[in-house]
Image (cartoon, coloured by chain):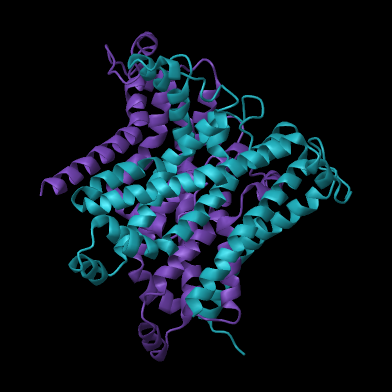
Amino acid sequence: MKKIIFKHIIIYIILFFFLIIFILPFWTCLTTSLKSEEDVIYTIPIQFPLSPTIKPFEEAFNIMQKPLLNSFIFTTFATIFSSILGSMNGYIFSKIKFKKSEGFFIIFTIGIFIPYQIVLVPLVITMSKLGLYNNIWGLVLTHTAYGIPICTLFFRNFYEEIPESLIAAAKIDGAGTWMIYRKIVLPLSAPAFVITGVFQFTSIWNDFLFGLVLARGTEALPASVALANLKGTTTAFWNVQMAGAWLYALPVVAIYILLGKYLMKGYMAGAIKG
Amino acid sequence: MKLTIDEIITIFIFSFSLFLIGYFVYGCIGWNIILSLSNWEGLNPSYNIIGFIQYINLFQDPVFYTSLWNNLLLILIFVPGSILIGLFLAILLDIESRVEGIFRTIYLLPFALSFVITATLWAWMYNPSIGVINTLLEKVGLGFLKSGWITNENIAMYSTILALIWQFSGYTMLVFLAGIKSIPEAQIDAARVDGASDFELYRRIIIPQLKFSALSAFVVLMVFALKAFDFIFVLTGGGPGYSTYVLPLMMYRETFAMTHFSYGATIATLLFIIVMAIVLPYLYMSFRGKRE
């Protein structure tokens, strides 16, 4: 008995040790974001501020306001577009087995894994030619296009679970492929849309590389690039940077707390990050 | 054959996706490979095909070998590090399943966040003068361990890798936890009846059945180890010197900072080939596995 209790104590000590390591950067980010510049220099980073101030947040918000709005707009649209297209493709791949459909599916799936460096230069040229460089709709198009592979994979795996008999019955009643999608498949898709939507929203919100090469100046600048720029300047002190990090993290943290269950399902269904 | 209106709509929608993938994935890859065989430098997009000269230049560039070596370090340290810590945490949480939810939520949080955020946090952790780690080390009397972390070129890459393991361990933990949950209860109960201790249970029954979880985590981490860009770009920018350069970062610098477009395309093509050499066998295996 004693031995068992001892074992549990050891495990808990290890778990809490890792807990501290995982939380420490977030904790110091929080304390630092509420400190004045003097406090940042003269207090220990993990210590709570002597005189808490929200000034760093005000300063960071002034700089990040427009980029946050930009990110919100293109992330929302690209999430919606890529999820809808993914749903339709997923249906086609799982329920209409046409000639070479598996080959096409592999062609789609490879798109998940490519290192985006391989498309950057042609992408920038294309967007410039289309007049979409430094434009929010350029980012919507980019994130939609590169979001299709993973969304298609999510929906195809989900639709594989829909019994074939349901589709066959509708076919006998004379429903065509598009009608079956609208009347049978789509109404069953709510959970898949939540999982895919949450996954896409966080990935696109978190993206840095596409924003970095497709936006200059303020017009379409995403929040990720704005935060990186904030870090690059010498004028923004640590407290402002930390406040900026919180502002940019907020939507994802909110999703993580409220819809974490679905986000984890998304990670499990084929999380490809980076 | 006459198409119904339904089929026309379906074909139209599918063609639209196919067009986007065809252009933005495969078209751009092809275009990039052509660029890698050309001599485009400077902002004006004018170039001639010159063959493999860029590749020959690349193989003679010392920065290329520094970058490649750092990618290799990620594969050698970051990948097994994340897998082992994730497995360890998954086993501990599986034993203490009552508190699994809350610990899992906190361990996984870094993975949900943008690399720009985590890099900003770790820049503050590693800051040599007033940063978190050095200040704490001094306060607890371990001042002699203070270091430049990301400003010392001998250890900057290792500091970067450590922070990345911090970000990815929660993910591997999640993969292994799901793998453990998929093992039939009956097997575990049977082992328990036979008097297996926790240690034996995990060593003989559970861990051997996590092969597929380990493989999928391994592929995801390997691909990341090659593609890693955001985090390193924001944390160190490749510095000090070239000490934390990786191939994607070298590609970005050559292309967008120095406008050596063809040279950048060459680095990207090589990176693409390496990634595909890992991904394609994996995809082939999983598709064949599904069909059988």
Left or right of B125 on screen, residue A134: right
Position of A96 relative to A226 (above/below): below
Q: Can residue A86 be seen here?
A: no
Q: Residue at x 37, y 56 (%)?
A: B176
Residue A166: give x, y in percent of width and height.
35, 83
Left or right of B75 on screen, residue A7: left
Q: Is residue B246 or residue A11 the one in the foreground?
A: A11
Position of B142 relative to A117 (above/below): above
Position of A242 relative to A251 (above/below): above
Q: Is residue B231 or residue A212 the one in the foreground?
A: B231
Outermost residue to the left: A1
Number of numbered discs overlaid on the protein picture: 0
Q: Can residue B111 be seen here?
A: yes
Q: Residue at x 44, y 20 (%)?
A: B145
Q: Residue at x 70, y 58 (%)?
A: B27
Q: Which chain is purple?
A: A
Residue B182: give x, y in percent of width and height.
32, 66
Residue A197: give x, y in percent of width and height.
40, 55
Q: Residue at x 43, y 78 (%)?
A: A179
Quadrant housing the N terminus of chain B = bottom right
Q: Is residue A114 or residue B184 the one in the foreground?
A: B184
Question: Which quadrant of the structure image shows residue A39?
Answer: top left
Residue A107: give x, y in percent of width and height.
61, 67
Q: Which chain is cyan?
A: B
